[in-house]
Image (cartoon, coloured by chain):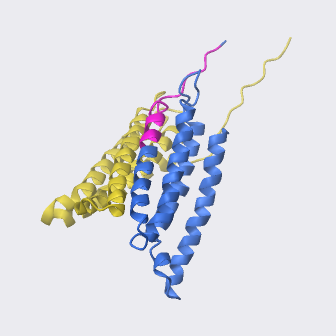
């Protein structure tokens, strides 16, 4: 696989989450300085999860998927399905946690389920990345003899 | 390593030291009674760490190592990249000074709101200038 599609998706999704997370954070901080909408504090869990899990963690997963050492034989990036599963679980978890304050009596359950999905996503990425975290063997091509 | 990356990395290390000093001050609450201004430093500590240290280190390295934008403008719009540096740090410094003074000084609320706007603008600009560099690396053409 010469074009790591997952790397691009994860990195771009990470950037989008960062944009959304910063927007929520800025709304809360502005309100803290000049109060105008007290309900904005409900965005605090979303701000934290979008920045730390959806943004930075997903960004790091994307980069790691692209640059960790590859195997000599196919599949060169190891178990790619596990990496995709990690991204899907992580994203489902982030959205559940972010929306949990708005789910009324289901808020606690949604928060717990969201955190569990995030943990499952992290575990899936660990299982994907573990065998790729190893020393890189560099083979130097033999020099041609000059006649 | 480009000059902007050097500035980011050095400044992020300064923020790390500051964050850990603030953490030490906060930890001293268990031994002594702190003035209210110092006791209100928890959000400042967290954002010194996450924005000043972690995010600025990442931004600096991204600017340095991500695939080039184009053969002519390798790192994209460098003027905008420098603008992100100044706006982000301006916003963070405003927060550090205004947030503990909230409710104690009349100017603090306005400065905190301004800090929110500055950090938001910096974040959007960072996403904008980085977006074009998130792609597979260019293949080197053989001569």
Residue in the foreground of this view, choosing between A28 and A107: A28
Instruction: Return the x and y of residue B89 as percentages of the image width and height.
Output: 53, 52
Q: List the single residue furthest toward the front.
A: B106
- The quarter holding residue A103 reads bottom left
Quadrant showing the C terminus of chain A: top right
Taking B50 as reference, is A86 left or right?
A: left
The residue depicted at 18 percent of the width and 59 percent of the height is: A102
Q: Chain A is drawn in which colour?
A: yellow
The residue depicted at 58 percent of the width and 43 percent of the height is: B61
* Relative vertical location of residue B84 with respect to residue B142 in this rendering, above or below: below
* Residue B61 among those drawn in magenta: no
Residue in the foreground of this view, choosing between B89 and B55: B89
* Relative vertical location of residue A143 with respect to residue B66 in this rendering, above or below: above
Q: Can residue A119 be seen in this view?
A: no
Q: What stretch is highlighted in magenta?
A: B124-142
Instruction: Return the x and y of residue A140 as percentages of the image width and height.
Output: 72, 30
The residue depicted at 54 percent of the width and 82 percent of the height is: B28
Residue in the foreground of this view, choosing between B138 and A67: B138
The residue depicted at 47 percent of the width and 71 percent of the height is: B41
Q: Chain B is drawn in which colour?
A: blue
Instruction: Return the x and y of residue B98 as percentages of the image width and height.
Output: 46, 64
Instruction: Return the x and y of residue B7 as percentages of the image width and height.
Output: 64, 47
Q: List the single residue furthest toward the left.
A: A105
Q: Is residue B64 visible?
A: yes
């Amino acid at each position: 696989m010469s074009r790591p599609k997952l790397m691009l998706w994860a990195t771009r999704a990470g950037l989008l989450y960062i944009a959304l997370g910063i927007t929520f954070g800025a709304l809360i901080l502005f309100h803290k300085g000049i109060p105008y909408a007290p309900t904005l504090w409900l965005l605090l869990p979303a701000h934290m999860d979008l920045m730390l899990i959806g943004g930075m963690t997903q960004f790091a997963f994307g980069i790691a998927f692209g640059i960790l050492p590859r195997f000599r034989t196919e599949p060169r990036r190891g178990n790619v399905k596990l990496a995709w599963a990690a991204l899907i679980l992580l994203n489902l978890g982030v959205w559940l946690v972010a929306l949990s304050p708005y789910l009324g009596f289901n808020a606690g359950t949604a928060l717990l389920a969201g955190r569990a999905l995030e943990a499952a996503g992290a575990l899936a990425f660990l299982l994907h990345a573990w065998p790729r975290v190893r020393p890189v063997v560099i083979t130097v091509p033999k020099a041609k003899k000059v006649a | 390593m480009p000059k902007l990356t050097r500035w980011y990395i050095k400044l992020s290390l300064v923020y790390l030291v500051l964050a850990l000093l603030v953490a030490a001050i906060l930890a001293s609450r268990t031994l002594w009674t702190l003035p209210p201004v110092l006791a209100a430093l928890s959000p400042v500590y967290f954002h010194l760490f996450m924005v000043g240290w972690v995010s600025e280190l990442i931004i600096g390295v991204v600017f340095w190592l991500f695939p080039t934008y184009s053969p002519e403008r390798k790192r994209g719009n460098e003027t905008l990249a420098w603008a992100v540096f100044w706006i982000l740090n301006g916003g963070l410094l405003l927060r550090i000074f205004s947030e503990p003074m909230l409710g104690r000084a009349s100017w603090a609320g306005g400065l905190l709101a301004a800090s929110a706007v500055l950090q938001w603008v910096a974040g959007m600009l960072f996403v904008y200038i980085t977006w074009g560099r998130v792609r597979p690396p260019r293949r080197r053409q053989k001569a």
